[in-house]
Image: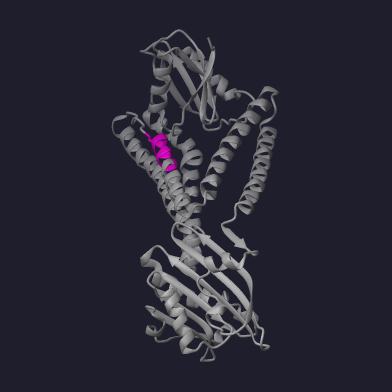
């Protein structure tokens, strides 16, 4: 039979009641704690028995210490005198057990006990969650700003999915911090009023699992709807990376402790290992993202393939003999939008006339953001995507003007202007579909009708 076994034990560090109940249950099943990892705790087989456990918080202790400090050893002697045996430790947390159910508690002053818990939890629990909430809040602000400024690209690149995930993550971190603060305030008041320690109760395990399930559901739905699994693959890689970092970190600390490496050396080596893991993971993610691009570009298509994909061609406008060259077909799919871009050029065989036609079709699948997308187009897409700033036209000379939409069979129609003069760049809105049309020549009434019949069906 196995003499040692590891069990998953993810508790809030201040959850003394939860940890003690967990250890008592394991002892009743014949397992005694001997080592505390980050997520998995190591137990050794014993005769099933009823043990009483106690958690002590030692402010100046560190998991990088090669062995118990002198003050901890003195404290351990005091505990052994009271009938408590040392089981395991993890940094500031010391775990003791006793076979005597009526053993005198190690800490008898509830006020001091609450204070010792808070002195450790402030920097190792509350502060990290507050910093995580703040950093995730900054990322959320960045995503929201990106969406407001550039909603079309945000929809196409899955920014909305990231916004939802950030909101869920912020709620998790914020709830963890608030849950501890509420417990601390109540525990401090109760300790002063009647000298009793308020039992702890934390649901980190449930909330963490709930958060993970939500993230997987969101990314799975996004991947299914957009036919792109890169987001969920990246999440799985991140989960694997976190697991690997935790494993190597714990192994490094344990390995150096066996050789009695000084605390500073242990800390520096462990940090170096983590940095190396982060660097290696960044390289993997970068290659993964570049390998699984969201774009599908075909530069070599037959005429039949092009006509099947592109609903509008130069030959639909120009009569006579022309030689059409396919420049680019580009698609970009997501759960909230679809982009189709076609470019082509044509030479007249009977004259020196040259024609170019480019158009982008956006199918916005979220109706209420269409107006945001149209407004953003004027400020960003309708200008920058056409590279007017690279042709010597300053952006302060560019404007747009609404034109009659009925002739285009559109809900709305706009033309781009330079110094108040219209140029051949149009923005057409058909329901949730937005079309940017860029012909190199001035469209006639008949050619406008061709566009209307193509997109206004």
Magenta extent: 202-212
- In this view of the protein, can residue 146 be seen by the observer? no
In this view, 404 is above or below 296: below
Q: How is the image coloured?
A: one colour
Q: Is residue 111 above or below residue 32?
A: below
Q: Nearer the viewer, residue 134 or 3?
A: 3
Residue at point 63%, 26% (across, down)? 254
Say which of 223 and 32 sits in front.
Answer: 223
| 187 to the left or right of 120 | left
- The residue lying at 62 percent from left, 23 percent from top is 67
Q: How many marks?
A: 0
Residue at left offset 56%, top offset 43%? 238
Seen from the viewer's position, the closer of residues 265 and 207 is 207
In this rendered view, identify the residue nearer to me: 42 or 408: 408
Q: Quarter of the image containing the C terminus?
A: bottom left
> Residue furthest toward the top?
47
Q: Is residue 157 visible?
A: yes
Q: Is residue 25 left or right of residue 5?
A: left
Residue 74 within the magenta-colored segment of the rendering: no
Residue 178 left/right relative to 35: left
Residue 379 on image: x %, y %: 50, 77
Residue in view at x 52 percent, y 59 percent = 157
Q: Please, which residue is most extreme toward the left here?
A: 194
Residue 3 percent across, percent down from the top left: 54, 12
Above or below residue 444? Residue 366 is above
Is 208 magenta? The answer is yes
Left or right of 315, for residue 427: left
**Residue 382 location (% of width, % of height):** 52, 77
């Amino acid at each position: 039979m196995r003499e040692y076994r590891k069990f998953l034990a993810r508790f809030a560090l201040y959850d003394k009641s939860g940890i003690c109940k967990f250890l008592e249950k394991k002892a009743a099943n014949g397992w005694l704690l001997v080592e505390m990892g980050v997520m998995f705790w190591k137990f050794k087989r014993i005769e099933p028995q009823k043990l009483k456990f106690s958690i002590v918080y030692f402010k100046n202790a560190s998991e990088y210490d090669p062995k118990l400090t002198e003050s901890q050893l003195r404290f351990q002697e005091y505990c052994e005198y009271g009938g408590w045996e040392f089981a395991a430790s993890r940094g500031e947390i010391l775990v003791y057990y006793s076979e005597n159910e009526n053993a005198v508690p190690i800490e008898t002053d509830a006020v001091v006990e609450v204070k010792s818990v808070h002195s450790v939890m402030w920097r190792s629990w509350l502060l990290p969650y507050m910093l995580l909430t703040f950093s995730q809040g900054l990322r959320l602000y960045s995503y929201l700003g990106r969406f407001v400024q550039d909603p079309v690209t945000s929809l196409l690149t899955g920014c909305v999915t990231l916004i939802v995930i950030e909101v869920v993550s912020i709620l998790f971190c914020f709830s963890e911090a608030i849950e501890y603060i509420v417990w601390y305030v109540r525990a401090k008041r109760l300790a002063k009023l009647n000298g009793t320690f308020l039992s702890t109760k934390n649901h980190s395990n449930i909330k963490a699992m709930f958060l993970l399930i939500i993230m997987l559901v969101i990314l799975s739905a996004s991947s299914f709807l957009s036919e792109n699994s890169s987001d969920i693959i990246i999440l799985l890689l991140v989960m694997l990376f976190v697991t690997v970092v935790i494993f190597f970190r714990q192994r490094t600390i344990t390995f150096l402790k066996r050789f009695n490496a000084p605390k500073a050396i242990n800390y520096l080596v462990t940090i170096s290992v983590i940095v190396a893991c982060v660097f290696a993971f960044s390289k993997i993610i970068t290659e993964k993202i570049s390998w699984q691009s969201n774009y599908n570009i075909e530069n070599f298509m037959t005429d039949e393939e092009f006509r099947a994909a592109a609903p509008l061609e130069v030959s639909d406008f120009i009569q006579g003999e022309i030689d059409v060259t396919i420049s680019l077909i580009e698609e970009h799919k997501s759960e909230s939008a679809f982009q189709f871009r076609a470019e082509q050029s044509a030479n007249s065989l009977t004259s020196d006339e040259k024609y170019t036609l480019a158009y982008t079709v956006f199918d916005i699948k979220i109706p209420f953001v269409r107006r945001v997308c149209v407004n953003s187009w004027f400020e960003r897409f309708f200008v920058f995507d056409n590279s007017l700033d690279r042709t010597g036209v300053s952006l302060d000379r560019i404007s747009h003007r609404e034109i009659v939409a009925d002739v285009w069979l559109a809900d709305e129609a706009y033309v781009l202007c330079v110094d108040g003069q219209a140029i051949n760049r149009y923005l057409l809105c058909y329901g949730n579909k937005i079309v940017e049309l860029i012909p190199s020549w001035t469209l006639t009434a008949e050619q406008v009708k061709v566009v209307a019949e193509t997109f206004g069906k």
